[in-house]
Image (cartoon, grey):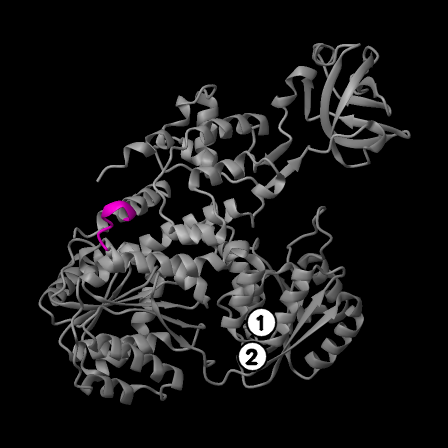
C-alpha cells in the first residue's frame, strides 16, 4: 500500500520550500536526525514543537513599561548617537519618545548604517523587546522587532520559541514553520467525535496551527487542547503499531504444550537451593501461558541476582518435556557465556543438551552444533542475536528467551524474523520498568516480577544529612573503620569544575587522606583499566579501608565486607543511579548503611528524590517515582537504546493520555483488524503521519 495522496505535501523535501538552499537543508537534515540518506521533510518542521511562547501583546506607553517586561511600543525616533570612531565596543544609541516618556534603543557592533535605515529620524516605528535600565533610563537592547507603522500586522504578537541548533536562527525557522503549517491538508479524523467534543479537541490541522501560530499564549501551552490532541495522536500511532506487531505475532497461533515434569524435577533436584516464592509464582504463570493455545508474550523483571536465569531455565526444561527446543539470546557474547556457565551444569545433571553459539567459534564446532539444532539433539541454544541468522535451522523452536539488558525493541526484531515468529516469547530485564513504560514499549506484554532480594542480602539503613555535618561524618567514619568496616565515598565529578560548585573526587580524596592516610584510595573513570583494577583488588583484599570514587563503581563491583556507602552531592544524582549505588553495599552478612550528603539549597525535585531513596529499597517503587520526577526518556536511557522518543508528547504532562490511547488502539484493532473502511483509512493516515510505515505491511487482509 502506498502513502495516501493527500499526505504527499508533508513528505516533500525541505529543499522544495522557497528560501531553503543546500546549506540550510543539510543543517536541518542533521538537526532533525532524518534517516540515513534521506533529507529532512516538511513534516519534520511540523513535528518540531515550540518550547515556549513570547507574548508581545502588551502595548503600553513608555511610562507603563516595566523592567524585564516584553512590550511592544509605538515610538517616535528623535536622534542617533553612533559610537565614536575607533571605539567599536561603544554601542550605537537611538533616542526615542512617545506621549508618556523617553527611552533609548541600544545596538552593539552595528555596522553598515542599517540601524539608521531601520529607524529614520522623525518617523514612527513599532518596536518590540525586553525593557532594561541603564543609568536610570529605560532602554531596549537589540529589539526583537522593528516595523513600520503601516506594517504592524507583520509583527507576531504571540510568538512561539523553538529549540534551535547552531547556524539556525529563530527567524528562519519561524518562516519555515509558517510555510509548513500552510501545507497541512484536511485529513480524515481518526479520533471519535464524542472524544473530540468531550475533550474540546481541535482537528489535526487546526491543532498544528494553534500550536505553531497561536493567537494567544495559552493555545500553545503543553496542557492546551491543541497540544494534548497532538500528544494523543503520537501515543495512538505508537499503540496501534504495537497492536499490529503483537497481532502479527499472536495470530501465528501458538501451540498448547503439555509437560511431564520429569526434566524440571531433575533440574530442581540439581539446584543448590530451593526456588523462592517469587520464582515459583513466575513459573506457574509461564507454564500456564505455554499450555494455552495463544502465544506467550511475557516480561520477567527482577533486580540483578534475583534468579531470572533459573526461571528461564525451568521454562526451557518444560519446553523440552513437550518435545520442543528453546533459544536464549543475550545482547553480548560475554553475557551469553555467563548464562551458559550458569545453566550448563544443571542441564547436564538433567540430561539436557545445551550448546553455546558464538561468533568466534571454530568452524567444525559450529557445524556440529548446527547439526544438533537441526535434528533436535540439542534442546537449548544460548547465544547472541546470531542465533537467528539464516544458516541456523532449528528442528522445532518453541520458546525464545531474550535477556534484554536495557535494549528494548526486541519485539519488533523478532516479529520480523521467521524463526521467532511462531515461538513463545519470554523477555528478561533487570531494569524495573513501570507499567506505563511496559505499555509504551511492549504493548500488552504480561509481566512477572521477582521482588525478593537475593538470598542473604541485608537491609540497608539510609540517612540524609547536610554536608555541613562533614566533621561529624568523618569522625563517625573513623570509629567504624577502626572496628573493621570498609566504606565507599562517591562524588559526582572527577576533578574540580569552574561551572559547578561541587566537590570533586580528587578534592575529597586529598582531604580524606589527611585523616585516613594510606587507608584511603581513589578510583575514577579516567584511570587506565589496569590502575582501576589494581585499586579495586586492593579494596577487595581489605588493604584499603575507604574508597573514594566517581560513579564508575555503579556496576559490577562485589565487596561483601564493604558496609558503608557515602554519596556526596546526592542531590545531583538520578533516582536510578542512587538505587544502583546503594546496592553496592548490603551484600555481606552485616547490616549496612547508606548516607546521602546534600548541599543546600535543595530543589523540590531533589528533596523528593532523596526522600524516596530514604523511604524504600523497592526498585519498582523507585522506578515509578523516577518516571514521575524525570519523564520516561531518561528512565530508560532512550537516547542509547533506540526506543521511541516522543516529539509531540511530553510524558510528564501527557502521561494520562497513554492508557487512553492504548485502550482505543486495542478497541480499534478488535473492531477493525484489517483497518478497512473510513475509520481504517483514517488510522492508516495517522500511521503514515508518524512514520510507522513499517507496521503497515503487518495489517492483515480481511
Res 517 → quadrant:
bottom right
Residue behind mark 2:
586
Q: How far apart are the alpha carbons under marks 2 and 1?
A: 8 Å
Q: Residue at x 67, y 36 (%)?
A: 55
Residue 642 visible somewhere in the drawing:
no
Residue range corresponding to the magenta coloring: 673-679
Q: Quadrant of the N terminus?
A: top left
Residue 6 visible somewhere in the drawing:
yes
Res 247 → quadrant:
bottom left
Q: Which mark is residue 552?
A: none
Could you tell me if the residues under marks 2 and 1 are in contact, i.e. CB atoms within 8 Å?
yes
Q: Nearer the viewer, residue 580 or 261?
A: 261
Q: Is residue 82 left or right of residue 190?
A: right
Residue behind mark 1:
582
Q: Nearer the viewer, residue 403 or 66?
A: 66
For label 2, the SS is loop
- Report x, y in % for residue 189: 36, 44
Amino acid at each position: 500500500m502506498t502513502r495516501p495522496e493527500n499526505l504527499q505535501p508533508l513528505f516533500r523535501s525541505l529543499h522544495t520550500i522557497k528560501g531553503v538552499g543546500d546549506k540550510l537543508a543539510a543543517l536541518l537534515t542533521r538537526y532533525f536526525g532524518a534517516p540515513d540518506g534521506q533529507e529532512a521533510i516538511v513534516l519534520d518542521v511540523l513535528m518540531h514543537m515550540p518550547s515556549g511562547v513570547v507574548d508581545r501583546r502588551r502595548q503600553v506607553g513608555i511610562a507603563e513599561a516595566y523592567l524585564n517586561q516584553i512590550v511592544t511600543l509605538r515610538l517616535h525616533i528623535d536622534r542617533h548617537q553612533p559610537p565614536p570612531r575607533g571605539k567599536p565596543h561603544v554601542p550605537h544609541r537611538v533616542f526615542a519618545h512617545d506621549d508618556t516618556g523617553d527611552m533609548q534603543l541600544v545596538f552593539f557592533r552595528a555596522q553598515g548604517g542599517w540601524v539608521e535605515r531601520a529607524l529614520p529620524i522623525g518617523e514612527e516605528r513599532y518596536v518590540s523587546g525586553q525593557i532594561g535600565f541603564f543609568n536610570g533610563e529605560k532602554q531596549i537592547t537589540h529589539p526583537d522587532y522593528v516595523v513600520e507603522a503601516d506594517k504592524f500586522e507583520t509583527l507576531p504578537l504571540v510568538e512561539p520559541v523553538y529549540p534551535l541548533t547552531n547556524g539556525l536562527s529563530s527567524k528562519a525557522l519561524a518562516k519555515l514553520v509558517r510555510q509548513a503549517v500552510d501545507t497541512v491538508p484536511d485529513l480524515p479524523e481518526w479520533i471519535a467525535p464524542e472524544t473530540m467534543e468531550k475533550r474540546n479537541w481541535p482537528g489535526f490541522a487546526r491543532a498544528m496551527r494553534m500550536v505553531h501560530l497561536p493567537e494567544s499564549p495559552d493555545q500553545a501551552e503543553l496542557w492546551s487542547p491543541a497540544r494534548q490532541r497532538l500528544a494523543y495522536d503520537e501515543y495512538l500511532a505508537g499503540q496501534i503499531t504495537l497492536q499490529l506487531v503483537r497481532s502479527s505475532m499472536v495470530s501465528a497461533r501458538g501451540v498448547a504444550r503439555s509437560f511431564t515434569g520429569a526434566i524440571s524435577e531433575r533440574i530442581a533436584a540439581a539446584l543448590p537451593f530451593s526456588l523462592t516464592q517469587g520464582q515459583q509464582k513466575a513459573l506457574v504463570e509461564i507454564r500456564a501461558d505455554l499450555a494455552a493455545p495463544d502465544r506467550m508474550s511475557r516480561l520477567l523483571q527482577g533486580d540483578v541476582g534475583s534468579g531470572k536465569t533459573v526461571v528461564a531455565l525451568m521454562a526451557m526444561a518444560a519446553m523440552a518435556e513437550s518435545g520442543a527446543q528453546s533459544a536464549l539470546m543475550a545482547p553480548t557474547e560475554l553475557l551469553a557465556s555467563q548464562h551458559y556457565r550458569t545453566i550448563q551444569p544443571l542441564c547436564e545433571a538433567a540430561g539436557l543438551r545445551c550448546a553455546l553459539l558464538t561468533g568466534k567459534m571454530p568452524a567444525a564446532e559450529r557445524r556440529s552444533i548446527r547439526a544438533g539444532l537441526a535434528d533436535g539433539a540439542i534442546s537449548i541454544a544460548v547465544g547472541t542475536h546470531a542465533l537467528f541468522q539464516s544458516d541456523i535451522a532449528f528442528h522445532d523452536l518453541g520458546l525464545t528467551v531474550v535477556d534484554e539488558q536495557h535494549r528494548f525493541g526486541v519485539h519488533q526484531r523478532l516479529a520480523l524474523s521467521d524463526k521467532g515468529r511462531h515461538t513463545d516469547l519470554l523477555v528478561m530485564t533487570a531494569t524495573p520498568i513501570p507499567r506505563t513504560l511496559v505499555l509504551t514499549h511492549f504493548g500488552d506484554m504480561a509481566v512477572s516480577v521477582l521482588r525478593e532480594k537475593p538470598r542473604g542480602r541485608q537491609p540497608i539503613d539510609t540517612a540524609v544529612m547536610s554536608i555541613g555535618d562533614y566533621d561529624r561524618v568523618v569522625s563517625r567514619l573513623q570509629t567504624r573503620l577502626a572496628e573493621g568496616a570498609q566504606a565507599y565515598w562517591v562524588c559526582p565529578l572527577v576533578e574540580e569544575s569552574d561551572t559547578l560548585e561541587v566537590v570533586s573526587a580528587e578534592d575529597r580524596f586529598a582531604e580524606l587522606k589527611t585523616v585516613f592516610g594510606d587507608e584511603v584510595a581513589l578510583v575514577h573513570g579516567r584511570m587506565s583499566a589496569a590502575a582501576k583494577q589494581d585499586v579495586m583488588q586492593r579494596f577487595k583484599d581489605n588493604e584499603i579501608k575507604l574508597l573514594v570514587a566517581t560513579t564508575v563503581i555503579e556496576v559490577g563491583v562485589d565487596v561483601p565486607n564493604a558496609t558503608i556507602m557515602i554519596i556526596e552531592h546526592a542531590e545531583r544524582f538520578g533516582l536510578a543511579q542512587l538505587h544502583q549505588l546503594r546496592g553496592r553495599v548490603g551484600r555481606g552478612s552485616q547490616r549496612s548503611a547508606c548516607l546521602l550528603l546534600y548541599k543546600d539549597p535543595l530543589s523540590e525535585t531533589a528533596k523528593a528524590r532523596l526522600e524516596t531513596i530514604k523511604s524504600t529499597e523497592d526498585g519498582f517503587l523507585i522506578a515509578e517515582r523516577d518516571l514521575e520526577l524525570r519523564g520516561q526518556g531518561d528512565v530508560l536511557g532512550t537516547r542509547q537504546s533506540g526506543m521511541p522518543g516522543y516529539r509531540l508528547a511530553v510524558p510528564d504532562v501527557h502521561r494520562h493520555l497513554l492508557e487512553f490511547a492504548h485502550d482505543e488502539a486495542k478497541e480499534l484493532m478488535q473492531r477493525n483488524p484489517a483497518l478497512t473502511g473510513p475509520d481504517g483509512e483514517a488510522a492508516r493516515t495517522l500511521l503514515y503521519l508518524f512514520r510507522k510505515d513499517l507496521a503497515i505491511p503487518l495489517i492483515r487482509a480481511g
